[in-house]
């Protein structure tokens, strides 16, 4: 059996093991760290090759994988309950100090791989991130073999593979950000875009349009395939507007999110594309991303008393916790020690948004959602 298939089989057992998230750190190093290193071809009994508690100047790292007396990879096996971004930054600094060319971190459930020379921050240096609760075993197994097997490290091909994967991830992120940035420019809308379009209209017809007409035009034409669905917050056709005169555009304010006017159950059949909070519009790809980004906004605006979200758990499912293992699919809220549960339905996420608004003294109209009806799955035609 090939190494990747063996590792994938072991990962499947980890995915099904309810005890793994509760293992003490020393046992986690043995059950996960040493086992995967053995499967990757490293001599775990040779302390010159696999050095435990390797010191980089700060907190020791679980393992350093060495060849020819030099640390090539730092492998951390640790549950970090504090600032994960700061922890990864320290791991990368340790790798740079010791000359290690790759870094790997796992808490048993999540796996991060980094190319320390690719950037100063963890997000810039990130090569891959996997989560056993939602990702299949095969991609993680293949990544581990390609980047961290002894054979690949000895041949030197591991570094070229890491660089190629890093470039692919960077390109994918840029391509993903392009439509989101476009939506933000249109939905905002960006004042520079408003001025540019106004000038172009004036050049064509010799008249300057009212700014409100331009603003509404941009909002109505933002990502037409996604944002102009039947329930889009910004959809208001001029010909259907009783204030319009034969289609002449007038200032049409955005319709509110429906949070105040509609029950949360309404959103169960909707997709979400963007939200606007206090005039700032953020494009999102899912309800889960909306929840996390919204939590980032509240945490930044209320750093002193953001922990009050922990009291919102009463009378319902656990939505916020200081301990990630108490949640099914947790995401850490930026610049806090608090995690939010992302395995929630759209209805539950809207209820959480309402609770956030009310807990921090905002009106429901302060949050605008851009939604659309969920697209039906395509079915094969029967002849």
Image: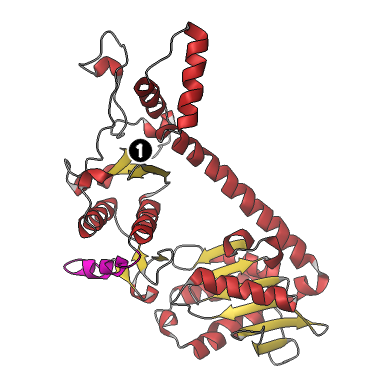
Q: Which residue is mark 1?
A: 376
Give the answer, above or below, for where 297 lies relative to 122.
Answer: above
| Quarter assignment of residue 356 | bottom left
Q: Give whichever of 83, 132 is nearer the camera.
A: 83
Q: Give whichever of 129, 291 is nearer the camera.
A: 291
Q: Is residue 129 magenta?
A: no
Q: Determine the residue positioned at 52% across, 11% down.
A: 203
Q: Determine the residue positioned at 55% across, 86% down.
A: 29
Give the answer, above or below, for where 155 lies relative to 209.
Answer: below
Where's the N terminus, which quadrant?
bottom right
Q: x and y percent of residue 204 in the render?
A: 51, 9
Q: x and y percent of residue 53 in the render?
A: 63, 89
What SS does tag 1 mark?
loop
Q: Determine the residue positioned at 22% across, 57% down.
A: 355
Does the rendering let one see residue 29? yes
Q: Is residue 312 magenta?
A: yes
Q: x and y percent of residue 225 in the render?
A: 42, 30
What residue span does the magenta drawing correspond to?
303-317
Q: Determine the residue positioned at 63% across, 48% down.
A: 171
Give the answer, above or below, for where 76 lies relative to 331.
Answer: below
Where's the C terminus, which quadrant?
top left
Q: x and y percent of residue 101 in the render?
A: 73, 71
Judged left or right of residue 10, residue 64 is right
Q: Give whichever of 149, 126 is nearer the camera.
A: 126
Judged left or right of residue 338, residue 347 is left
Does the rendering let one see residue 6? no
Count every numbered label the image shows and give the total: 1
Give the answer, above or below, for where 255 lies relative to 310.
Answer: above
């Amino acid at each position: 059996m090939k190494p990747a298939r063996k590792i994938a089989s072991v990962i499947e057992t980890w995915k099904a093991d309810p005890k793994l998230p509760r293992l003490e750190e020393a046992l986690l190093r043995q059950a996960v760290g040493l086992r995967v290193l053995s499967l990757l071809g490293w001599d775990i009994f040779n302390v010159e090759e696999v050095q435990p508690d390797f010191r980089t100047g700060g907190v020791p790292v679980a393992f350093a994988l060495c060849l020819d007396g030099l640390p090539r990879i730092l492998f951390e096996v640790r549950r970090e309950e504090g600032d994960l971004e700061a922890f990864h930054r320290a791991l990368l600094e340790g790798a740079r100090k010791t000359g290690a060319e790759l870094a790997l971190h796992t808490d048993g459930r999540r796996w991060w791989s980094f190319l320390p020379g690719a950037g100063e921050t963890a997000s810039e240096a990130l090569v891959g991130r996997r989560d056993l609760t939602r990702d299949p075993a095969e991609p993680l197994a293949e990544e581990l073999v390609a980047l961290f097997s002894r054979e690949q490290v000895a041949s030197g091909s591991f570094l070229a593979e890491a660089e190629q994967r890093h470039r692919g991830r960077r390109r994918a992120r840029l391509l993903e950000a392009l439509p989101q940035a476009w939506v933000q420019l249109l939905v905002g809308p960006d004042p520079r875009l408003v001025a540019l379009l106004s000038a172009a209209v004036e050049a064509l017809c010799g008249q300057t349009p009212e700014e409100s007409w331009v603003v509404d035009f941009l909002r109505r034409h933002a990502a037409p395939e996604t944002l102009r669905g039947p329930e889009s917050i910004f959809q208001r056709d001029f010909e259907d507007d009783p204030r319009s005169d034969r289609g002449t555009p007038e200032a049409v304010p955005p319709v509110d999110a429906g949070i105040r006017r509609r029950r949360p159950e309404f959103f169960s059949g909707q997709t979400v594309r963007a939200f606007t909070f206090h005039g700032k519009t953020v494009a999102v790809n899912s309800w889960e991303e909306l929840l996390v980004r919204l939590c980032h906004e509240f945490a930044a605006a209320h750093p002193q008393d953001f922990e009050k979200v922990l009291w919102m758990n009463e009378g319902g499912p656990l939505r916020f916790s200081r301990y990630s293992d108490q949640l099914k699919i947790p995401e850490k809220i930026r610049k806090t020690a608090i995690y939010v549960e992302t395995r929630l339905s759209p209805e539950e996420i809207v209820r959480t948004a309402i609770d956030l608004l009310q807990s921090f003294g905002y009106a429901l109209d302060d949050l605008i959602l851009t939604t659309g009806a969920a697209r039906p799955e395509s079915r094969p035609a029967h002849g």
